[in-house]
Image (cartoon, rainbow, N blue to C red):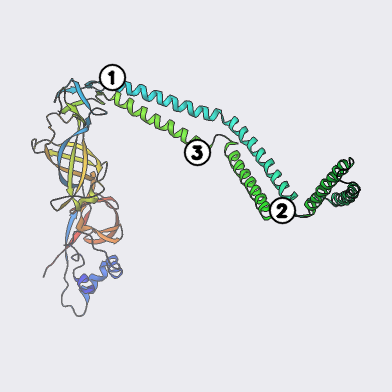
Amino acid sequence: MLAEWIRHPFRVGLLSRRPVRIGVASALLIAIPGVAYYLLAYSPNQTATVEPEFQTSVARQGDLILYASGSGTLMAGNQVELGFGTNGTIAEIYVQAGDTVEAGQILAEQADREQLEAAVAADELALLEAQQALEELNASADLVAAQAQLGLADAQAALEAAQASWQSQQAGYRASGTTIRAAEAELALAKESMETAEAEAANFSSDDPQFAQAYKDYAAAVQRYWKALANLNWYTGHPTEVQQAKLEAELALAKAELEKAERAYSQVQSGPDPDQLTSAELQVANAEAELALSRRNLERSVIVAPNAGTIMEVSGGIGDTVSSPFLTLADLSRPELEVFLDETDADKISIGDEVEVVFDAFPDMIYRGLVVQVDPKLNTQLGVATIKGRVLLDSGEVDGLLVGMNAAIDVIGGRAEGVLLVPVEALRELGPGEYAVFVVIDGEPQLRSVEVGLMDLTFAEIRSGLSGGEIVTTGVVETG
């Protein structure tokens, strides 16, 4: 390959449309082309010197335009479908297809608007009631918090009472030592009194008049004894299993009631109950949504043109019941093209690119516009993948155009006017984005770095490194 390059230094890669990357060895030889010629002319093995014949081109001023071609169909710009806000009957239609209308102009009216007005009034009342309920909930927050705080205090007192009751019933906690000793003394006295009364009553026969009094005193002494015994037994005893279970249950219930009261107070001490507040706010939001819908339905019972334009279609008549749009309005002053390009041109179209358009009906006229939309996915029809986009035509150039017209388009991906141009065959790629050319000076090619701008398959824009009129090589001619 090196020998081939030495014999034909400018022919390698000429048939390729893209510049050929130059290797390190080749770059060294290019930098000193005289060395190659010397080796070729004065080698002992050579019997004659072969002078190469250069193909050359003159750097000149010109225009360079990069474009991608495709097809398009004219569409109405800013087209909208208009109808009532809800199912209804058409009462009046004031336009027909082809009419030009102004923004704000009334186009049609719906029948039975009284029902829509009544719906608005009902929804306004529902919203007012929901708002009042929310206000009352917020206003009563202080009272609710105070009641919850009182309930918390009562629950705390009930728990303390239950704890005291439980404690006082346990063995060893029913009485102090002094109380127990007093009860024991009382029992001893009662027993002694009972025995004395019993002995006194035994001194009389049952028919003795003094027997009745003596027996009465004895009975009172017995009651005193049993009461003193019961008191002492209680002071020194413990609850039964049933009593203990009841005490435990009462204590657990009091604790649960306190926890409940604490939660209730925590929820309302800084405002209304969160669940109630959320519910009330939701009621207001729902009422607002219902009112907005009913107002929208009432407002849209009269169809008004949102912008100036032309009525493209009327698909209903007076007395018809409609549930979908029946008027089509379009702005024909700024029509758009729906355009299609081959998928291989994906890198040649972007929003903002200039477009030149030639309609089949007007082959001698060129219309201009801008790309305003490029679909993010390919459009596939009948197995053919294309790039789909929209082009907005310039205003003032649309007279005589009809929606649906077909056209050929050129998307201008780049434009350079009055710039220095050389054939792409003159370029030598030194690295990514770095180029050089061979400039012929005094009959000898000299390598020079250049800055390249736009480039197509034929010409390249030279932004710096070369002047107009200079001669560059594009290859050599094989001479035998």
Q: Quadrant of residue 478?
A: bottom left
N-terminal label among 1 and 2: 1
Q: Which residue is mark 2?
A: 239
Could you tell me if the residues under marks 1 and 2 are in contact, i.e. CB atoms within 8 Å?
A: no
Q: Is residue 35 above or below residue 469?
A: below
Mark 2 neighbour class, 10 Å CA radius: few under 14, some 14 to 19, many 20 or more: some
N-terminal label among 3 and 1: 1
Q: Position of residue 209 (x, y in %)?
A: 89, 40
Q: In front: 109, or 164? A: 164
Question: Which residue is located at x 34 percent, y 23 percent?
Answer: 120
Q: Which residue is mark 1?
A: 114
Secondary structure category for the residue under label 3:
helix
Q: In front: 101, or 182? A: 182
Quarter holding the C terminus is bottom left
Amino acid at pointer 3? Asp
Front: mark 1 or 2: 2
Q: Is residue 399 left or right of residue 416?
A: left
Q: Position of residue 213 (x, y in %)?
A: 87, 41
Q: Quadrant of residue 285?
A: top left
Amino acid at pointer 1? Glu
Front: mark 3 or 2: 2
Could you tell me if the residues under marks 3 and 2 are in contact, i.e. CB atoms within 8 Å?
A: no
Quarter holding the N terminus is bottom left
Amino acid at pointer 2? Pro
* Alpha carbon distance from label 3 to label 2: 45 Å
Is residue 152 something one can see in this rendering? yes
Q: Which residue is mark 3?
A: 275
Q: Is residue 361 left or right of residue 85?
A: left
Q: Is residue 283 above or below residue 46?
A: above
Secondary structure category for the residue under label 1:
helix
Q: Position of residue 374 (x, y in %)?
A: 24, 44
